[in-house]
Amino acid sequence: MIFLRHGQSEFNLLFTATRRDPGIIDPKLTPLGHQQAEKAAAELAERDIRRIIVSPYTRALETATPVARALGLPLTITPTVRERYAFACDVGSPISRLRTDWPDLGFHAIDEVWWPAIEEPKEQVMERAALFRAEMAALDDWAHTLVVSHWGFILAFTGKSVMNGDMIEADPTAGPPESVTWKH
């Protein structure tokens, strides 16, 4: 399967420049982030993708939308692949607002507030990644899945740090990474 880290967000732009949390809740993509999403859509059009799983954060939805359009696939939205809750950008938008902003998407069986109330320990992110790994490994067609996610979740699943708009392939049957270094 393929993981695609969301394109550059407003948070990423400012945090990279200052290394301080700019306090932006559920940020949108920057113009560069939209370009990264379009580039990913073009690259993925050549792949045999049959399923797109995406985090409910706006930056992930904005990244996944052109990919879904290019591939003619629906988005399966799940908080399981969300970012580790550690910064202001990890406060999401309530489902009622997401339904208004994205009326054509299905937000089924997702709680109104789907992100944690307090900072999420790294161990919990690793547990979420393990759960998702088991769910994906049980599917016969996991190799045809795209997951639009975030730095922390992709790191927990693969053990590798991925830049905005970049992709990495992963085999859920291979087991967890041997080690994870939580340094961005």
Image (tube, helix red, strand yellow):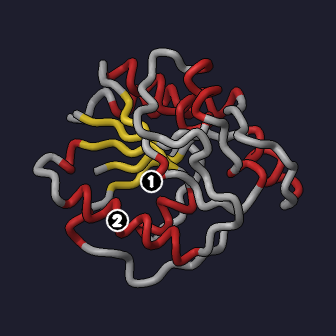
Of 116 and 131, which appears nearest the observer? 116
Q: Nearer the viewer, residue 32 or 130?
A: 130
Residue 130, percent from left and from top: 36, 69
In three-dimensional space, the C-alpha distance between marks 1 and 2, rounded to whole angstroms, equals: 9 Å
The residue that appears at 16% across and 52% down in the rendered structure is 139
SS at mark 1?
helix
Task: Please tell me the numbered disc located at residue 131.
Answer: 2
Q: Residues within 10 Å of mark 1 (few under 14, many from 20)?
A: some
Q: Position of residue 35 (x, y in %)?
A: 59, 28
Image coords of residue 128 (percent x, y)? 43, 65
| Above or below: residue 60 compared with residue 22 | above
Q: Amino acid at mark 2?
A: Leu
Q: Residue at image x 60%, y 18%?
A: 100
Residue 32 shown left or right of residue 142 in the figure: right
Q: Quadrant of residue 76?
A: top left
Question: Is residue 111 depicted above or below 30 in this figure?
Answer: below
Label of residue 139 in the image:
none
Q: Give the answer, above or below, for where 63 lies relative to 11.
A: above
Residue under the point 69% across and 58% down: 117
* Residue found at x 51% / y 26%: 38
Decide: is 184 above or below 55.
Answer: below
Q: Quadrant of the C terminus?
A: bottom right
Are dots 1 and 2 in contact, CB under 8 Å?
Answer: yes
Residue marked by disc 1: 80
Residue type of the residue flagged with mark 1: Thr
Q: Image quarter for residue 133?
A: bottom left
- Farthest-out residue, bottom: 178
127 and 67: which is toward the camera: 127
